[in-house]
Image: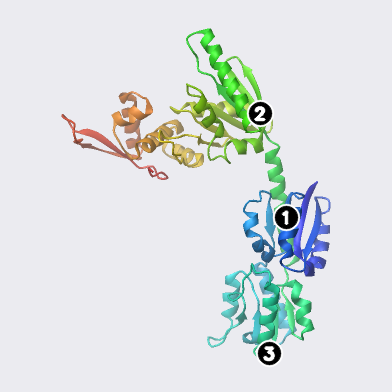
Amino acid sequence: MIKIGIITAKGTIENFKPIFEAFHDQCEYYFLTYEKLQEIHKIFHQNKEMFDGFIFGGPLPYYFLEEELKSYTNPVVYVDLTKEDFYKHLFKITQQHKGIDFSRVVIDYVWNKDNLRELQSLLPDNKKIYTLENTIDFKNNRLYEEILNCHVELWEKGLIDLSITRAANIVDLMKAKGLNVYYMGISEDTIKGKIEELITHIEFLDLKENQVVAGFIDSPVANSTSENELIQISIYKELLEFSFQNDLQLVIQRNNNSFEISTSYRELQEITNDYRSCKLIRFLKERLSFDVYVGWGIGRTFTQAAQHAKLAYSEAKSYIDSCTFVIDEAHHSMGPLGFKETDGTEITFHSWNEIEQLSQQVDITVSQLQKVITAITRLKTNELTSNTAADVLNMSARSTNRLLNELVEKGLANVESRKINGLQGRPTKVYTINLPFFNPQ
């Protein structure tokens, strides 16, 4: 069952407990309360490996841990006042304090600046509501003391009649000093919504991580059986070495001239740096004397994953250099990954969705668009000729010319005849490529 940690102020626990009881059949939950803000870091670090996700009882503990959370991979959410919550509280205040003058009210923080602006708009131009939000450091261990002192100072100056606080842990301290206090808590519906959001996110990640991942590599065909055997042995050897060096649990199976790999979703994320590049293709390219292409497939079953891996391999093979594609369970394709220029700098490619969407809009194949992007990136210009594009794409000038003219027909390029410096004879056709999502680096 899902395990959720609830990091919240001790003063809020009685409000949270009955709400979480409604979710006892969906998750195990544990309250990790703090009285002092400096306790938050210790609570998180002692418990972060024990839970599938965390819910914070307000924005304050969440922002207190903001830096640590950047490297935390499990889901986290925090509850905060919605606009509906805010105005419900204001209505209650006007009912409890008839004829209240909001220019004699202080609210320590609301986080949502729109709420504060709208509250201020209710007052005459020459009056304002007091707020501490712009004068306190929300990551200071002494924040509670600072907030309390600010409230007390305003009361001692006779400037206010009501203190509104969001900090549950100082309510009793404020009352002990004789302050008229209203605690602005978060509604049950808002908290329930955030609990459901966190559970959904955890379940989605769990589903992802339990999906099956397959890889596919087809070895180049040589002129003789003995050469084919040597190629396959070298690929198999390097796959095993890659798995060993990176401490991965890759299961590698050789089938005739191809290799099938099975692994986990988490390991695929590691191999592809979260789908930004591919460690495997780089490893193989450094050690093999021939180009290798890798397809990765994700699916609910190994059969589905293997089918997607073969499709991804076909996409990778449409390129002229070693690269990787990934096709997920929803048939979305990501790639190419691990594609490098000759100077070793990484090329940034655009998302498959953008390329696929343009392909459908103008009725041109994804493979053709990929080839154009490759030429633009390698030449570092969107002005191509048939000859320059043919050279980098390893295509005939005639095929390249046909591709470029099709781009003109589809409105993705303009063409003009120019005299090229240093060349004799007739002007050369120069194609200026204008893909809506792409600029050459």
Does residue 154 appear to the left or right of 337 in the view shown?
right
Q: Is residue 329 visible?
A: no
Q: Nearer the viewer, residue 361 or 324?
A: 324
Using the image, tell me which numbered label, if any, was put on residue 305. Answer: none
Q: Name the amino acid type tagged 1.
A: His
Q: Nearer the viewer, residue 244 or 192?
A: 244
Residue 311, given in percent of the width and then of the height, sits at 55, 27
Residue 383, located in which quarter of the rendered image?
A: top left
In front of the other: label 2 or label 1? Answer: 1
Residues under labels 3 and 1: Cα distance? 40 Å
Pick whichever of labels 2 and 1 is earlier in the sequence: 1
78 w.r.t. 124: above or below:
above
Using the image, tell me which numbered label, if any, was put on residue 250. Answer: 2
Pick whichever of labels 3 and 1 is earlier in the sequence: 1
Q: Name the amino acid type tagged 2.
A: Leu
Judged from this view, the residue extending furthest toward the front is 245
Residues under labels 3 and 2: Cα distance? 69 Å
Judged from this view, the residue extending furthest toward the left is 425
Does residue 10 appear to the left or right of 153 in the view shown?
right
Q: Residues within 10 Å of mark 2 (few under 14, many from 20)?
A: many
Q: Name the amino acid type tagged 3.
A: Glu
Q: How is the image coloured?
A: rainbow
- Residue drawn at 57 percent across, 75 percent down: 117
Badge 3 vs badge 2, beta-carbon distance below 8 Å = no
Q: Is residue 310 visible?
A: yes
Q: Residues within 10 Å of mark 1 (few under 14, many from 20)?
A: few
Q: Which residue is mark 1?
A: 45
- Residue drawn at 37 percent across, 34 percent down: 375
Residue 327, given in percent of the width and then of the height, sits at 57, 34
Q: Which residue is mark 3?
A: 156
Residue 404, located in which quarter of the rendered image?
A: top left
